[in-house]
Image: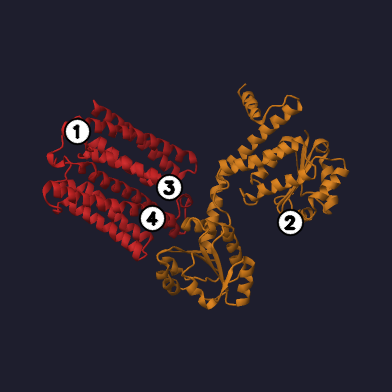
């Protein structure tokens, strides 16, 4: 029953995300503020339904005694659902701080991708956690990491906007879009601020994983592909921060590095499932 | 209410005729008009047009009276240069003027302020009544609305304002930014004044002849710096405006590249309005450096003007619609069953249906 409810709600949320993203793209090319308002209202409504869907999933998850009271982010569906939820939440935080509704077109597609992949390809059914995962770390480790991933997705969107703006101004023939996008310096600062906020989450999330691994498997680090790739991601973003902070490298080149970092995030989240025995959502390892 | 309008504009009259009318103070017109038994009138006088709006009894007089009245005060012949409108056509004309549709640069916003000033001057002189008050306040409202609802005012149409807009696309807020001016030419001064209206944090002027640079710096309340040290000041500047009379480029790729490490990746916006060029074109290829030459800025202006074209018809239709609303209100007031301007729209709507 609760499974039906979560599917119904996430489908409705996905529809609203699609509509909101459409408004965001319309707003990119129309100066009418109403599109920006519609984008936010639709996204907000989608977010509420999505929260409802996630709540229904938790409820279904906790029906199984050994799962109480852990977060249901153990499966591909749970992870994608939480990830897209977090992307939308982080977007609202950024939007509240900066009032850059125009960035919706660059960030919100990720909510559609995340929720869409969950609806289309992932199995929403809930199962009992294997004993190794029955730990309070289950409620912290993936949550912290995926929130960081969601923030990186936002930073990626900001980076795309910056590359477009930079290209516009270098071209010497800026279009109307150039005056609608935030300035190069603003986008650069925003990209940096999001990564600065997300990087500690990523680091802490990885360390938590290590502690959990020590408790569960008796070793802190085992070069499991997920661990390796999470470390690679962290190193790329550390490189970005190092260049920004110490070398004063900004603008286009810094954005390229952060984008490589995001590609590594995507691979860590998706690609590694095919490689890792311990972290594979798809291989059923948990 | 009877309304009539007589005017000369940039399309109908040569500059000498417009100037002869422009030099006469509005107060002088009002004084004379009152002597002639006319107590409700507004004079709109700008460098591109002169218009006299007559309301009340004088608005019903023959328009040749108004023409000869103006000829007498300005001391020029208006024959063949003036245009005249009455009643609804005069209202529509005023709304188009306020919307910038009759301006040399379509959609320019200055005219709206000029209409406002003209109306306020007339009101202070005691030359407005109920109808002219509503008419001019309505014109100001329509002027604003048309600029908001259509794209006639989208995009900057002067080189200096395009430069400022680009600076904002690079830096956002300009209030913490530093501007360096090379040369003390007129164009540099104009661009700097535009940037100053955005209140930049610091403005420096470097000129080969110290005295001229210092004079410009004083006019702009800027800081004069030695010409020899401009490469040093490049490190702190965000916007550079180059307009020296030099025969060879003064800002070479080498000089700009030399300043970049100290800039820590901050963007540098270089505007070259000198002829011959002041800045080597290869500077544009440097990371974080954006070089715009005069023709780049002019190209943007030309494209902005072009894209306004299609919107003009839409704006004109809107101006006519609003004029119709106003006239419906006016008639209802004359018949003693005054409806609000909002109702005027509905009344017209109903008529259109039946």
Closer to viewer: mark 2 or mark 3: 3
Name the foreground residue: B133 vs B329: B133
Q: Residue A154, position in %: x, y? A: 35, 48
Q: Earlier in the sequence, mark 4 or mark 3?
A: 3
Give the residue displayed 35% in from the left and 34% down from the top: A48
Secondary structure under tag 4 reads helix
Q: Residue B325, position in %: x, y? A: 66, 32
Q: Name the residue under label 4.
A: A163
Q: Mark 2 points at which residue?
A: B15
Secondary structure under tag 3 reads helix
Asked whether the viewer can see residue B68, the reply is no
Tell whether B73 sits left or right of B101. Answer: right
Q: Name the residue under label 3.
A: A97
Q: Mark 3 lies on which chain?
A: A
Asked whether the viewer can see residue A212, the reply is yes
Give the residue displayed 22% in from the left and 56% down from the top: A232
Name the foreground residue: B252 vs A231: A231
Secondary structure under tag 1 reads loop
Q: In which quarter of the image is the C terminus of chain A?
A: top left
Q: Which chain carries label 2?
A: B
Distance between the alpha carbons at the discs numbered 4 and 2: 49 Å
Q: Are marks 4 and 3 in contact (CB under 8 Å)?
A: no
Residue B97 placement: quadrant: top right
The shade of chain B is: orange
In this rendering, the answer to whether A158 lies above or below B254 is: above
Residues marked 1 and 3, same chain: yes
């Amino acid at each position: 029953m609760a499974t039906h409810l979560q599917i119904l709600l996430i489908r409705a949320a996905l529809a609203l995300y699609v509509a909101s993203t459409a408004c965001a793209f319309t707003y990119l090319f129309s100066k009418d503020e109403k599109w920006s308002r519609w984008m936010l209202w639709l996204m907000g409504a989608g977010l509420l339904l999505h929260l409802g869907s996630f709540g229904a999933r938790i409820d279904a998850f906790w029906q199984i005694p050994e799962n109480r009271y852990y977060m249901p982010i153990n499966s591909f569906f749970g992870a994608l659902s939480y990830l897209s939820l977090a992307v939308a939440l982080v977007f609202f935080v950024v939007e509240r701080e900066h009032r850059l509704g125009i960035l919706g077109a660059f960030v919100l597609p990720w909510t559609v991708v995340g929720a869409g992949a969950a609806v289309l390809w992932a199995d929403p059914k809930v199962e009992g956690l294997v004993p190794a995962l029955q730990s309070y770390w289950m409620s912290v480790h993936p949550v912290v990491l995926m929130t960081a991933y969601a923030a990186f997705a936002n930073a990626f969107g900001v980076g795309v906007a910056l590359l477009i703006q930079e290209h516009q101004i270098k071209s010497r023939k800026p279009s109307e879009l150039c005056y609608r996008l935030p300035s190069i310096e603003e986008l650069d600062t925003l990209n940096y601020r999001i990564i600065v906020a997300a990087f500690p989450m990523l680091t802490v999330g990885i360390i938590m994983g290590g502690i959990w691994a020590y408790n569960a498997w008796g070793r802190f680090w085992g070069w499991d592909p997920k661990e390796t790739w999470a470390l690679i991601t962290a190193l790329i973003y550390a490189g970005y921060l190092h260049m920004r902070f110490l070398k004063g490298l900004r603008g286009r080149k810094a954005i390229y590095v952060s984008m490589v970092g995001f590609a590594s995030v995507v691979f860590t989240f998706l690609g590694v499932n095919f490689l890792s025995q311990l972290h594979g959502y798809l291989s059923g390892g948990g | 209410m009877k309304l009539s309008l007589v005017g000369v504009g940039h399309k109908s009259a040569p500059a000498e005729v417009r100037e002869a009318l422009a030099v006469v103070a509005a107060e002088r017109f009002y004084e004379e008009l009152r002597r002639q038994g006319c107590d409700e009138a507004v004079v709109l006088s700008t460098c591109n047009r002169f218009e006299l709006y007559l309301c009340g009894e004088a608005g019903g007089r023959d328009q040749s009276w108004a023409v000869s009245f103006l000829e007498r005060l300005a001391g020029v012949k208006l024959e063949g240069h003036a245009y005249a409108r009455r009643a609804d056509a005069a209202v529509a004309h005023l709304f188009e003027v306020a919307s910038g549709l009759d301006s040399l640069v379509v959609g320019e916003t200055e005219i709206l302020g000029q209409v406002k000033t003209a109306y306020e001057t007339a009101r202070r002189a005691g030359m407005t009544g109920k109808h002219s008050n509503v008419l001019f306040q309505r014109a100001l409202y329509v002027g604003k609305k048309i600029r908001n609802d259509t794209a006639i005012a989208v995009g900057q149409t002067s080189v200096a304002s395009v430069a400022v807009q680009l600076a904002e696309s690079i830096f956002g807020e300009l209030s913490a930014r530093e501007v360096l001016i090379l040369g003390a030419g007129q164009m540099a001064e104009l661009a700097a004044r535009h940037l100053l209206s955005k209140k930049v944090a610091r403005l420096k002027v470097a000129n080969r002849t110290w005295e001229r640079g210092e004079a410009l710096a004083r006019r702009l309340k800027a800081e004069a710096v030695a010409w020899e040290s401009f490469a040093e000041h490049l490190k702190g500047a965000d916007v550079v405006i180059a307009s020296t009379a030099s025969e060879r480029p003064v800002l070479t790729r080498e000089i700009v590249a030399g300043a970049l490490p100290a800039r820590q990746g901050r963007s540098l916006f270089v505007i070259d309005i000198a002829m011959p060029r002041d800045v080597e074109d290869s500077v544009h290829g440097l990371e974080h450096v954006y070089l715009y030459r005069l023709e780049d800025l002019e190209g943007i202006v030309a494209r902005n003007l072009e894209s306004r074209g299609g919107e003009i018809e839409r704006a004109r239709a809107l101006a006519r619609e609003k004029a119709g609303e106003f006239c419906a209100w006016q008639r209802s007031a004359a018949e003693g069953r005054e409806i609000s301007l909002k109702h005027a729209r509905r009344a017209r709507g109903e008529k259109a249906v039946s």
